[in-house]
Amino acid sequence: MAVKKAAKAKKTAEATAAHAVKTGHKGKVVLAYSGGLDTSVAIPWLMEQGYDVVTMTADVGQQADNMPEINEKAVKTGAVSAHMLDLREEMIENYIWPGLKANALYEGVYPLNSAYSRPLIAQALIYIAQAEGAVAIAHGCTGKGQDQVRIEVCANALDPSIEVLAPVRDWHMTREQEMEYAERHKVPVPITRQSPYSLDDNLWGRSCECGVLEDPWNKPPKDAYGLTVDPLEAPDKPAITEITFDKGVPVAVDGKKMKSIKLIGALNKLAGAHGIGRIDMIENRLVGFKSREVYECPAAVTLITAHRALESITISKDVMRVKSDLEKKFSELAYEGYWFSPLMQAIQAFVDSTQESVSGTVRVRLYKGSAVVEGMKSDSAIYRHDLATYSEGDMFDHSASVGFIKVWGLPIKTWTQAHRKGKVVFKSVKDSHLKP
């Protein structure tokens, strides 16, 4: 069935291309559209290249007060149709929760909030393109950013027959030239104070770069943050919260069951109020240079901290060691745009298998920028008090240690007997100190 669909899609694309040669009309292109200057100007620009423009706006939980107006603006600017997709649950179920199960942190720090949304946007673009019979998709990324790589690699992984266009990367216009172009083409441009930063936000967190942040000696100013309070100004009384997990997925906060969107929102608010989740890092970018990035991920940091703690009492030592190595690879693949790669699929299958026992409750203290685990419990715990205790009720067989140590240390003992001769020497201790 899939082969027949692919053949039909190829035949349609070839027919469209042949028609374009004859008429100069290239067919439909689906544009990832935010309503900002870059993507607004991209509509008439793509029309000038011979395309009918269809827009796709993704709701991934970003803080935007103009979402209802975006489709209307797209059509007024020249789009033949406009789509608004609520992808919040899709992002959580297929991107955020898999990342949480993997305790995913790029370079051990960044919770990948922006990186998760890009393959999702690529997926939505291809979905609309296939439904609309479009020959291409387009995005508003620059030639310097890494989002262009993520979107294009993911799009090609999903449907290589659909071309990917990058107007902003191709037209080489300055911001002033874009404004002039918008005025000539009567493109409505939002009249707002231009932020000195480049911002991106969604359910899993907020990123901030550029401006004064480009100098790593500069302390991030207060206006660089939007989700968290300064830890020094956070409440003097800590907040204690209990997070319940079912097979690696959080399902309740303080005993109250919540749907995923509400749960993340509640933790963002609670942890953010205590200054949790501020990250200031020099990041090794995919496109070859280092970048100073400021992130705010209150819920993400809190949940990853709690999830990792719960795994410590529910997963065996050997599985945890292998999983730890694969968590790093998972994070790299997500960051680099290889979300739909065979390796990522294989790692996710392994991670999912480890989460069958990761159910229970973790108690976390939120206080002035720190999320600290204070307690954990699970019906699936492989931690046993009667084995760990040094007090009454100790069930550990101490006599078994003698034989275990002999066998465990035998390889080293055998090597020493064959190769290492002489007395033990300390460089800082003179032999005369020990002579009678």
Image: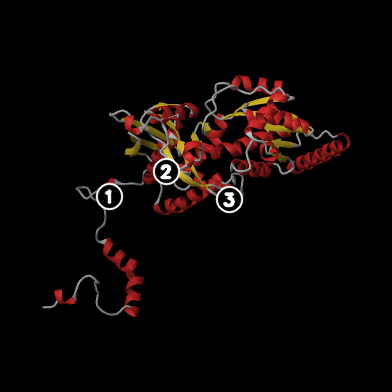
* Tag shown at residue 343: 3
**Residue at the extreme left of the image, as rendered:** 436
Sequence-wise, the earlier of marks 2 and 3 is 2
Q: Nearer the viewer, mark 2 or mark 3?
A: 2
Q: Do the residues bearing badges 2 and 1 touch, measured as CB atoms within 8 Å?
A: no
Label 2 – label 1 distance at C-alpha:
47 Å
In the picture of the structure, the residue carrying the numbered disc 1 is: 388
**Residue 93 in the image: above or below residue 188:** below
Amino acid carrying label 3: it is Leu
Front in this rendered view, residue 398 or 425 = 425
Q: Residue at x 51, y 33 (%)?
A: 197
Label 1 – label 3 distance at C-alpha:
38 Å
Q: Residue at x 24, y 58 (%)?
A: 398
* SS of the residue under disc 3: helix
**Residue 19 in the image: above or below residue 431:** above
On the image, which quarter does residue 19 sit in? top right
Picture coordinates of residue 320, whole percent (x, y): 42, 50
Say which quadrant the N terminus sits in: top right
Say which quadrant the C terminus sits in: bottom left
Q: Residue at x 72, y 34 (%)?
A: 129
User: Is residue 431 toward the left or the right of residue 297 in the image?
Assistant: left
In the picture of the structure, the residue carrying the numbered disc 2 is: 217
Q: Residue at x 57, y 36 (%)?
A: 117
Sequence-wise, the earlier of marks 2 and 1 is 2
Amino acid carrying label 2: it is Trp
Front in this rendered view, residue 105 or 228 = 228
